[in-house]
Image: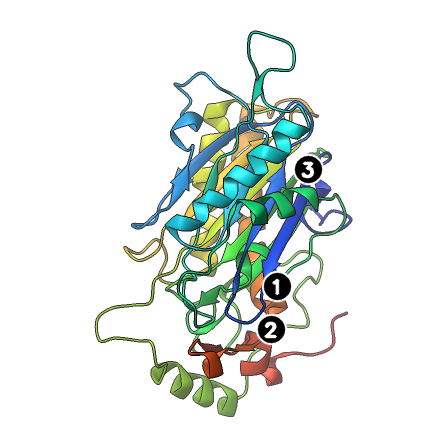
């Protein structure tokens, strides 16, 4: 196995990604859209967190009629942020894409979505993504390497007291089948081993992918613990609200049921990279998309295929952590959140 050319979800042919990033004063949120190839992609979903915010997930039940989606939206803004999906729907309408109805040109765009909690992190509670932000992300969707870090749905993300963000990764199997994942990392739990300062899933890297990521010094670890214990927004017994959301895509041919299973096993990637995970304060949701450009997966290969998808999710989470940068909105009544690289500078060596 090896990463694809960009080591991101767009290595799956035909898949495009666009971000709308709102990081001006008072704002720290955004939208990420994963656009399927023309004709759509078979899709499934698995929701594991105790506080999800989703749209059109019932449609993806294998028992239901519609078997393809045109895009998947990941966004900030908690429940109100789901309105950003409307902008993506409008873009698809303009492009004539959607589930065909009776007359030529009459379509219904199919766009599931999920949101994470980032309200108030820039100091203004009611600044959340609107339909125009979803449309902006759709219009910017491209097949070039995915921008990562504090962009799109990961703009205001936080993970275990450190800055979260968007991360992506891909893998090409020996058969030539490609899987890719994109994740907006925003969890109550931590993605960092407290005994070393190293991301939990860094050991899953392919071909030296995370060879430049080591353990933090004793001083960095002590300072990180002290800062974590003094976070100003922590209330006794009440963790901060969160949610990690993402998409796995593949060019293999899968049924809706197989996509649902891929999404479910993809949550194992969450569990390899975040502790604790799927808490009552997280709405962890993972979608799976299959474009069908290649053939189906033989039963004997299905386990290894889905396991590779889970590892891809975990690697995307590590990339999100590494790409995130520190933010400080405390002057506006918001949060100051350090990035992993600023918290553990001793753990980094120059990338190979």
Quick one: label 3 or label 1, which is nearer the N terminus?
3
SS label for mark 2: loop
The mark found on residue 15 in the picture is 3
Which residue bears the numbered disc 1?
149
- Category of crowding for the residue at label 1, using alpha-carbon neighbours closer than 10 angstroms: few (below 14), some (14–19), many (at least 20): many
The mark found on residue 325 in the picture is 2
Does the rendering let one see residue 324? Answer: yes
The count of marks equals: 3
Left/right of residue 304 with respect to residue 1 in the rendered view: left
Disc 2/disc 3 C-alpha distance (Å): 26 Å
Question: Percent position (x, y) of residue 154?
Answer: 54, 59
Left/right of residue 305 with respect to residue 281 in the rendered view: right
Q: In the orientation shown, which residue stands out farthest toward the left?
A: 237
Left/right of residue 3 with respect to residue 307 in the rendered view: right
User: Could you tell me which residue is drawn at 63 percent across and 59 percent down?
Assistant: 205
Disc 3/disc 1 C-alpha distance (Å): 20 Å
Question: Percent position (x, y) of residue 7?
Answer: 71, 52
């Amino acid at each position: 196995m090896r990463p694809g050319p960009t080591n991101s979800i767009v290595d799956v042919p035909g898949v495009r990604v666009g971000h709308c990033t709102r990081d001006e004063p008072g704002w720290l949120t955004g939208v990420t859209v994963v656009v399927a190839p023309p004709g759509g992609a078979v899709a499934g979903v698995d929701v594991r967190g105790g506080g999800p915010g989703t749209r059109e997930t019932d449609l993806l039940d294998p028992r239901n009629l519609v078997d393809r989606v045109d895009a998947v939206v990941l966004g900030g803004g908690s429940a109100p942020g789901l309105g950003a999906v409307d902008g993506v729907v409008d873009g698809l309408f303009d492009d004539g894409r959607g589930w065909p109805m009776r007359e030529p040109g009459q379509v219904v765009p199919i766009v599931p979505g999920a949101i994470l909690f980032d309200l108030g992190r820039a100091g203004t509670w009611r600044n959340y993504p609107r339909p125009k932000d979803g449309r902006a992300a759709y219009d910017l969707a491209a097949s070039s390497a995915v921008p990562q870090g504090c962009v799109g749905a990961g703009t205001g993300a936080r993970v275990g007291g450190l800055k979260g963000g968007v991360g992506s990764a891909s893998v090409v199997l020996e058969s030539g089948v490609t899987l890719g994942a994109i994740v907006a990392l925003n969890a109550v739990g931590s993605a960092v081993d407290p005994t070393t300062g190293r991301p939990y899933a860094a050991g899953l890297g392919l071909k030296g992918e995370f060879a430049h990521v080591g353990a933090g010094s004793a001083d960095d670890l002590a300072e990180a613990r002290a800062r974590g214990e003094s976070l100003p927004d922590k209330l006794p017994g009440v963790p901060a609200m969160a949610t990690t959301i993402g998409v796995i895509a593949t060019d293999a041919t899968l049924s809706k049921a197989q996509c649902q299973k891929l999404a479910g096993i993809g949550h194992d990637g969450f569990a390899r990279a975040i502790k604790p995970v799927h808490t009552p304060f997280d709405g962890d949701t993972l979608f799976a998309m299959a474009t069908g450009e290649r053939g189906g997966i033989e039963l004997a290969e299905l386990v290894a295929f889905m396991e590779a998808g889970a590892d891809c999710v975990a690697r995307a989470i590590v990339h999100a952590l590494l790409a995130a940068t520190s933010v400080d909105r405390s002057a506006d009544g918001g949060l100051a959140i350090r990035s992993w690289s600023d918290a553990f500078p001793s753990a980094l060596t120059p990338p190979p």
